[in-house]
Amino acid sequence: MGRYVLRRLAIAIPTLAGISLAIFLVLALAPSDPMADFATSPEIPVEVRENIRRSLGLDEPMPVRYVKWLGRMVQGDFGFSFASRSPVGKLILERLPATLAVVGAAYVLGILIAIPLGVLSAVRRYSLVDHLATTFAFVGFSLPTFFTGLVLVIVFAVNLHWLPFIYDSTVAVRDWDSLVRQVKQSIMPISVLALFTAATMTRYVRAEMIEHLPQDYVRTARSKGLSEREVVRRHVLRNSLIPVVTLLALGIPNIFSGAIVTEQIFSVPGLGHLLIKSIVSGDTPVVLGITFSYAVLVVVFGLIADVLYVLLDPRIKYT
Amino acid sequence: MTAGAGGDSAAIDAGTLREQRSLWREAWRTFQRHRPAMFGLVALGSLALAVAVGPFIYTEPINNLDFTRTVRPPSPAHPFGTDELGRDLLARTLYGGRISIAVGVTAMFVAITVGVTIGALAGFFPRADGPLMRLTELMISMPTLPLLLLVLLLFRDPLRSAFGPTIGIFVLIVSVIGLLNWMTVARLVRAAFLSTKQLDYVTAARSIGAGNLRLIVRHILPNVMSSIVVAATIAVGAAIITESTLSFLGLGFPPDEPTWGRLLFDAQNLLDSAPHLALFPGALIFIAVISINYIGDGLRDTFDPRRVD
């Protein structure tokens, strides 16, 4: 097992290097100077500007710059934000928990909806439940996250006044009241993402269940006298969930994209919110740092999914 | 889907053009029986027709400022209402739909071209397979949206000055969405190529002297067309969503180009006083995307060799 994890790690590193190269090339080949506002500002004399360029290593050949840049990135040194003058690494670490909380909660909620729904709709194929579940999956999958978010705001914040419009990041959970406030303001951002996840996953679970239900081992389980409930739960579901894990890993970039939109609508102080703010203000070091962080997150979760996959399926040899 | 190649090729094995055509006619007959897909086709068709000819019939200008009628709810004079500057929302939505659908279709062609080329090369030449599939896997773990935003941020101004504001952004958005969205297609095409190139008719064609290019384009590609059509349909929907997302974040088309996503971006601040500004364009995105997804689903069922008639 340990060797398998190491091997997967060894594959993950070139992937990260590749992604970082892509990000770097986009930046290096961009016709506009990433330090534009900084470098063309008339208040800065030419010599100072040259010094800044040199200190940023912009006078060196591209491969050298890439290796140096990557070296700093790996050590967690993302440079300094133009806007707030604080280290980008620190900004990212401050924002990361909110993003992980929203994405994590949405994933868990999505799984809790998708598994029962997918199983039910596969077991009662072509029934009313199946039609409803399939329609739910199609609708949830086709609704852009930004539209779901706005509709939720219109219904629950503007018309019903049940939930707060904007996420208030100053709420600290100390007592019952603040806990209720925190839960209330988290409901909409999490539901938007959970709906999307649940819809995607319901389709996967249903498809895998349908693939497994007619197989021989299911007939064997039935013929030895197990109740249908046991057959589905113990035999079919367990086998069906294994491929779902991989499909989940493939969906991770999507869920992070969804999180960017959600954070933006509800002003959740996460990575995505900071990313959009930095793009609008042209804060290149922060944009780069966050893009790279997303790459790391995607690769790390992909790794976790791969390891889970072999843990779940004893047929796969982890060599 | 990969099993599909075998079934299809049996139908085309005789290889004449007339029989190929009858395969597609057969497919159309099957497709018609898929009710949600037909519903999607009708809905999408009407939507496309509306945005194509709508602006000629409903001649209200899209940029007509009128401060005597700001933020009005829907009325007979303005079926979708008006926005905070008194502009007619129906006119803007119809116009925006043209851009959104054009972006979706063009980006799909970019994605399909890249995906089919890479998939075909990887599936046909064993030597190219390894490196190309590594590249595909790498692209799959790209954080697409942040990267898209980064590219837009850096390349926006030069392209704008080179092609003008609208065309420049259009070219940029279409190519970036396409270049970040070809991976599923490449995998599908590769898998289909791997199984199809083993078939006897390919060997036969090679033995009578068909070169690699001819084998790929004339003999294998038509047989994997069904997978490509399904993937292409889904890609249009994905591209429409991506473009709307970019515009919704305020980083897509310039403000004076009212794409559906941009209209939602503008509506965000008026949700309490004018929810209709968000609901109409949002509903249209939803209708377009769900129709496309249902059509894709219907096509998949149509081309599935395991289907029961």
Image (tube, helix red, strand yellow):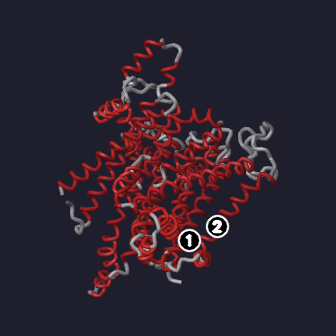
- Give, as a three-letter code, the residue at label 1: Gly
Does residue A76 show up? yes
Query: Residue under mark 2: which chain is it in?
Result: B
- Residue B211: numbered disc: none
The residue at 19%/60% (across/down) is A319
Q: Which residue is at the front of the view, A30 or A215?
A: A30
Find residue A193 and report its horizontal and vertical position in percent: 46, 53
Residue furthest out toward the left: A2
- Give, as a three-letter code, the residue at label 2: Leu
Disc 2 is placed on an element classified as helix
Disc 1 is placed on an element classified as helix
Above or below residue A265? Residue A83 is above
The residue at 49%/65% (across/down) is B214
Q: Which residue is at the front of the view, A128 or A146?
A: A146
The residue at 41%/63% (across/down) is B124
Question: Do residues under tags 1 and 2 come within 8 Å of each other at their CB atoms?
Answer: yes
- Would residue B91 appear left or right of A288 to someone viewing this image? right
The residue at 52%/54% (across/down) is B111
- Residue B41: numbered disc: 2
Alpha-carbon span between mark 1 and mark 2:
10 Å
Q: Which residue is at the front of the view, B17 or B120?
A: B17
- Would residue A258 appear left or right of B254 to someone viewing this image? left
- Residue B298: numbered disc: 1
Query: Residue under mark 1: which chain is it in?
Result: B
Find residue B88 and report its horizontal and vertical position in percent: 76, 46
Q: Quadrant of the N terminus of chain B?
A: bottom left
- Would residue A313 appear left or right of A177 to someone viewing this image? left
Above or below residue B28? Residue A225 is below
Q: Residues within 10 Å of mark 2 (few under 14, many from 20)?
A: many
Q: Quadrant of residue B61?
A: top right
Q: Which residue is at the front of the view, A59 or A277?
A: A59
